[in-house]
Image (cartoon, rainbow, N blue to C red):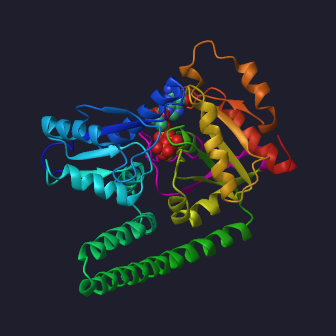
Amino acid sequence: MFKINGKLRVLPVHVIDPRLEKEKAINIGEELESLIHTLDADIPDRIIQKLDQPNNATYIGKGKIDEVAEKVLQHNIDVVVLNAMVKPRQVHALKTQLQKVKPTIEVWDRVDLILQIFDLHATTQEAKLQIELARMNYMGPRIYGMGFIMSRQGGGVGTRGVGETNTELMKRHWRDQKKRVQRQLEKISQTREVQLEQRKRAGFKTVSIVGYTNAGKSSLFNLLTGKHNLTKNELFATLDSSVGKVYLEDLHSEVLITDTIGFIRDLPPLLISAFKSTLLESVHADVLLHVIDVSDPEMEAKISVVNEILRELGRNIDDVIYIFNKVDLVKNLNEHEILEKYARFSPILISVKNGEGVEGVKERIKHRLLSGVKG
Ligand SMILES: Nc1nc2c(ncn2[C@@H]2O[C@H](COP(=O)(O)OP(=O)(O)OP(=O)(O)O)[C@@H](O)[C@H]2O)c(=O)[nH]1
Ligand SMILES: [Mg+2]
């Protein structure tokens, strides 16, 4: 879905729950637009829709659809993005409506958008397969939904059976394809497990960096390992896990450290399940570093999102170390308050940018490995 000439023109539709605090709504809206910018797309305009109750058929109501259609024409929009997780049949119905004014229009919900970004950023075969699986999981019900429409449109008694057969065929094809991808993924993950076993047997301890997307995980990884993973002021710059080594002087040994995909709110469970084998491997490391952007107004909510995902992956969060990064961006930061509030997570304040506090990270890792308790 990328334009060969010129940039993709995207119209975000900010669907806002009227019960949400204004500031929160703005932050969530900004996050959506950051995601869109990650695709190097233009956002010539935006639509805001307060929505108590989504329209059952098309998600947004008739009046809003007219407004969207008007903007689509006015700005020659390629893609309309709904800032919500929307039922596939509603996306499809909305797209059908908008195609009346522009036949090539695409409609994505938040998950489609994230999948597009993943597609663009994945480099390893494993990440590509994981995304393919996620997409299949997501498209599954959509294919079913479209089949449903077809069989309904068939209408008369004589054609109903044909529609149903098509749906069955599509479902079977979808299941077969899914199995194929799953098998390929299993092979890769087995290879990785063997490597991991070998490293463990060689006595290497493991450290993992997790956190919300754009918190500075790869920046910290690079600083600790001397590697050059891509760091960018962009969401989901990293999609592939990578492993490096850090030498801890006092331990006279190296530990293995992993950088991996960032988390985001409403990360659909199907995405987590597609990335599960890599995520599981990293969250079950001996030491888990949770990198947090201390300059982010949504910091607390994002900490909760990360903790929730860790729990879903079966990781006990009691022994996680909180690393509050980007202290250089906050004037008059109340360090004491943060250290006190998060005391049970061995918090540390750092700036990867100017190096402040970074030595302390190694200290924390070392302490945790030596004592096996909170450092
Ligand atoms: N000012 C400031 N910027 C930082 C600091 N650490 C990282 N950044 C910037 O924050 C942005 C995101 O950094 P990354 O290291 O790519 O973040 P990440 O957590 O790996 O992000 P994803 O892989 O996209 O999930 C980059 O533009 C970094 O240069 C810091 O201490 N201070
Ligand atoms: Mg990264």
Picture quarter with the N terminus:
bottom left
Residue 232 at x, y percent in the picture: 42, 39
Residue 200 at x, y percent in the picture: 71, 67
Residue 159 at x, y percent in the picture: 24, 84
Q: Is residue 176 left or right of residue 200?
A: left
Instruction: Name the residue rendered at 47%, 34% in the picture.
Output: 28
Does residue 265 sit above or below 277 in this rendering? Answer: above
Does residue 329 sit above or below 301 in this rendering? Answer: above
Instruction: Name the residue rendered at 59%, 59% in the picture.
Output: 279
Magenta segment includes 245: yes
Residue 207 visible in rendering? no
Q: Is residue 322 left or right of residue 71?
A: right
Instruction: Name the residue rendered at 39%, 56% in the picture.
Output: 115
Picture quarter with the C terminus:
top right
Instruction: Name the residue rendered at 67%, 72% in the picture.
Output: 198
Does residue 146 sit above or below 322 in this rendering? Answer: below
Query: 362 or 70: nearer the eye?
Result: 70
Query: 275 or 243: nearer the eye?
Result: 275
Image quadrant assignment for residue 164: bottom left
Q: Which residues are magenta?
A: 223-251
Query: Farthest top residue?
Result: 332
Image quadrant assignment for residue 93: bottom left
Residue 163 at x, y percent in the picture: 29, 81
Q: Is residue 336 left or right of residue 165?
A: right
Magenta segment includes 229: yes
Query: 150 or 46: nearer the eye?
Result: 150
Q: Is residue 112 left or right of residue 64?
A: right
